[in-house]
Amino acid sequence: MSAPPPKSTRRTVRITIVLLFTAWLVDYADRLVINLALPSIGDEFDVGRGEQGLIVSAFFLAYALCQIPGGLLADRYGARRVMLWALFSWSVFTALTGFAWSFGVLLLMRFAFGTAEGVFPPASMKVLVERTTRAERMGANGVIMSSNALAGVLTPLLVAPLIAVFGWRSAFFSTAALGVFVVVAIRVWLPAPLPVVEPEPRVDRRRAGGVLGKAVIWRFSTMMFGYSLIVWGLSTWIPSYVSEEYGVSLASTGALVAIPGLAATGAIVVGGRLADRLGGHHRRVIVPSMTAAAVTLLFMVFSPSLTGFIVFGTLATTAVSLCYMPILAVPLGGLAAEDVGVGSGAIVFGGQVAGMVAPPVIGALADAFSFKVAFASLVLGAAIALVMALLTPQDAASFRAATGVSELPTPAKEHS
């Protein structure tokens, strides 16, 4: 039985989790605000659902393009420095979104916002890896990533009334201020990396080549694409659907949207714990969860009442959210320390491509056919994630073998 980690290590892990949780909470809230503002923006700039979806896609286009460069920057210049730059920059562009005077300017601001946020995820992943042991990494990351779902609860509850009273621009000014606060907190309190007390895999570059050239990385990226297709297809358009279909006020819509967000918060934490307990083996979680998600999505679509729509939507969101951490578990356990930034960036890239595709496509399908047809199409995301779960390595050792690398002994040393 291994000795418990020293008190200083536990303190570093706890502080890191709290700070990254807060940073991700603000990150996710900043991007969710636009979903609640879309009806008001559509009215002000006289644009339909397809064009409204492009506003969300402008963010995700930049966000997707910057995932891999963000990982390269974090690996080269240091994760803490890159993360702080990203936080400050996206807060500035969030505030500037509130000053947009035309549809074109709004698209430009959202693209710039996505550029700044896009370098954050791989830098954040690297910060976490440097400050946790391998055994607790996915559990810690599950807690941190539950902030995304919690943002899905808090953002509609707090922002919808704000928009109703002060207009959509006020929401962007408010969330930008939160971002500046987080920048200061991380700069002051983020602890130094832990010394390396357990060997980390270090790859033989003569055999391995670049991590981006490995097909297994892109299979995990495709799995993340399927997962995110559902997440962003629902989160972007459910507020508009509930308001238009059932005549629910914006403030009440925020409360209803918070229900699946609350369920997802717990599901992401549970998914992280399962990933740690199973040692990866994401197939055991993703196959049954995505099957359940596909079924409940269809029940949601054809539900005759608002109550049924919310209940089945909550069940679908819960099932999908269980899969988030298992998708990342094996790569984060198998990537060499020097490849964590770029490797995780490549995987997250798949999710951001889905975020770029889903909003305008779902909006266009809703315009051309109906929201029922649009939401039913999200079953494709569950099918993609399920198939990729069957085609990817199930543990860290198999992942390293699939990348064609041989591990070299690594002497204990401190992270630079």
Image (spheres, rainbow, N blue to C red):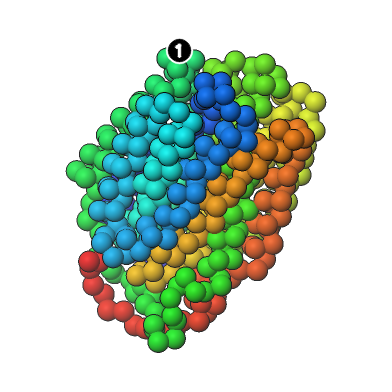
Q: Secondary structure at mark 1?
A: helix
39 vs 297, nearest the viewer:
39
Q: Is residue 230 left or right of residue 155?
A: right
Q: Is residue 326 above or below residue 100?
A: below
Q: Is residue 12 left or right of residue 265?
A: left
395 vs 120, nearest the viewer:
120
Amino acid carrying mark 1 in the image:
Val
Identified at 36% across, 46% down, the residue is 116
Identified at 61% across, 44% down, the residue is 358
Among all residues in the image, which is located at the extreme bottom?
206
135 vs 319, nearest the viewer:
319
Instruction: Residue 146: give x, y in percent of width and height.
Output: 47, 43
Q: Is residue 311 left or right of residue 156?
A: right
Identified at 55% across, 47% down, the residue is 356
Report whether residue 321 is seen.
no
Among all residues in the image, which is located at the extreme left?
188
Q: Is residue 220 above or below residue 181?
A: below
**Mark 1 sits on what residue?**
165
Instruction: Residue 155: give x, y in percent of width and height.
Output: 47, 29
191 vs 340, nearest the viewer:
340
Instruction: Residue 287: give x, y in percent of width and height.
Output: 69, 57
Quadrant of image for the N terminus: bottom left
Instruction: Residue 347: give x, y in percent of width and height.
Output: 50, 60
Identified at 27% across, 47% down, the residue is 84
